[in-house]
Image: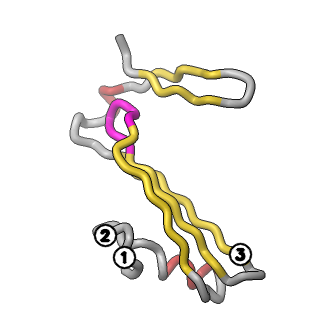
Amino acid sequence: MAACRETVSPTRTQRVPIETSEYDLETIRVFSDASWRAESHEAGFGWLLIDHLGKKEFQGRSTAKNIGTPRDGGSKRPSPRNPTRFGP
């Protein structure tokens, strides 16, 4: 049986097959996103790590204050080596 990932919407659940041959068995995929609010000068960051079967391995989120512009927020992103520490 092929590995599947479930996507859930308010009206239905869909199972999407994952091609395991596409990824090495040791592969971890990282998804991340960030946002910035001009009125409060705050930035938010989120990340999700998924294994080759589509299973969630780790997720996290963080915020930063006093971020002048969205570009400044990029320099304050969590470090990949230590997701709770900010900086390059």
- Of label 1 and label 3, which has the lower sequence position? 3
Are discs 1 and 2 less than 8 Å apart at CB?
yes
The circle on residue 85 is: 1
Are discs 1 and 3 less than 8 Å apart at CB?
no
User: In the rendered view, does 52 fall on the left or right side of 17?
Assistant: left
Q: Residue at x 37, y 80 (%)?
A: 88
Q: CA distance from mark 1 to mark 2?
A: 6 Å
The amino acid type found where label 1 is placed reads Arg
- Of label 2 and label 3, which has the lower sequence position? 3
Q: Position of residue 63 (x, y in %)?
A: 54, 73
The circle on residue 82 is: 2
User: In the rendered view, does 84 fall on the left or right side of 46?
Assistant: left
The amino acid type found where label 3 is placed reads Arg
The circle on residue 43 is: none
**Tag 3, which secondary structure?**
strand
Q: Position of residue 56 (x, y in %)?
A: 39, 40
- Against 79, is 4 above or below? above
Q: Residue at x 34, y 44 (%)?
A: 57
The amino acid type found where label 2 is placed reads Asn
Q: Residue at x 73, y 30 (%)?
A: 10
**Tag 2, which secondary structure?**
loop
Q: Position of residue 5 (x, y in %)?
A: 47, 27
| Bounds of the magenta segment | 50-55
